[in-house]
Amino acid sequence: MTSPRRRSVLLAAATGAFLLALSPVAQAESVRYYPVAPGYQLNVRSGPGTGYSIVRVLLAGAQVPIFCQAPGTTVTGPYGTSNIWDNIDDGEFVSDAYIQTGSDGYIRPRCSF
C-alpha cells in the first residue's frame, strides 16, 4: 500500500509531466518548418486566396510552419499549380505552390473557419 505522502509526490510528478506536454514549448517543438521556394518573396494574405489582403511579405529564404491547409484560389508557382493554401499563423495564409512540402496534396489537416 502507498503512503499518503508518496501518493502526493507521485500525483505531483504526473501532473507536472502532463502540464509540460501541453505547454507551448512542447507543442512548438513538434512544429515542422517548410522552405519558401528559393529566390521568391512571397505575399502572406489574410485568407486562402489572392482576393484577400496582403498582411506581410516573406523574404527569400524564409521557412514557415504549416498549421492547417484550406482550398482557395488556384495559383501557379515553382512547385506547380495548386488551390491549396497553407495557414502559417493566425489569419495568415500563403499559396502552397510556393512552399516546398514534398507533396502535391494536403499534408496537414484542413482548416476549420
Image (cartoon, rainbow, N blue to C red):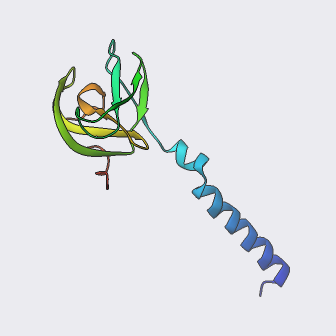
Q: Is residue 18 left or right of residue 113?
A: right
| Residue 105 visible somewhere in the drawing | no
Q: Is residue 39 left or right of residue 89?
A: left
Give the vertical position of 109 relative to 84 (above or below).
Answer: below
Locate residue 60: give its quadrant. Answer: top left
User: Which residue is located at x 47 percent, y 42 percent?
Assistant: 31
Does residue 90 show up? yes
Q: How many marks?
A: 0
Asked whether 6 or 74 is in front, the reply is: 74
In the image, residue 47 above or below residue 8: above
Q: Most extreme residue toward the top, as rendered?
A: 39
> At 81% from the left edge and 77% from the top edge, which residue is drawn?
6
Task: Please report the residue visible at 33 percent of the width from the left and 22 percent of the height from the top.
Answer: 42
In the rendered view of the protein, which quadrant contains the C terminus? bottom left
Where is residue 68 drawn, in percent x and y?
A: 34, 46
Give left or right: position of 14 versus 37: right
The x, y position of residue 84, in whole percent, is 22, 39
Most foreground residue, 6 or 94: 94
Left or right: residue 96 versus residue 31 is left
Residue 82 percent location from the top left of the image: 17, 33
> Which of the two residues, 38 or 71, is positioned nearer the viewer here?
71
Vertical placement of 76 versus 106: above or below? above
Instruction: Provide residue 58's location: percent of width, then percent of height.
Output: 40, 22
State the quadrant of the N terminus: bottom right
Q: Residue at x 23, y 32 (%)?
A: 50
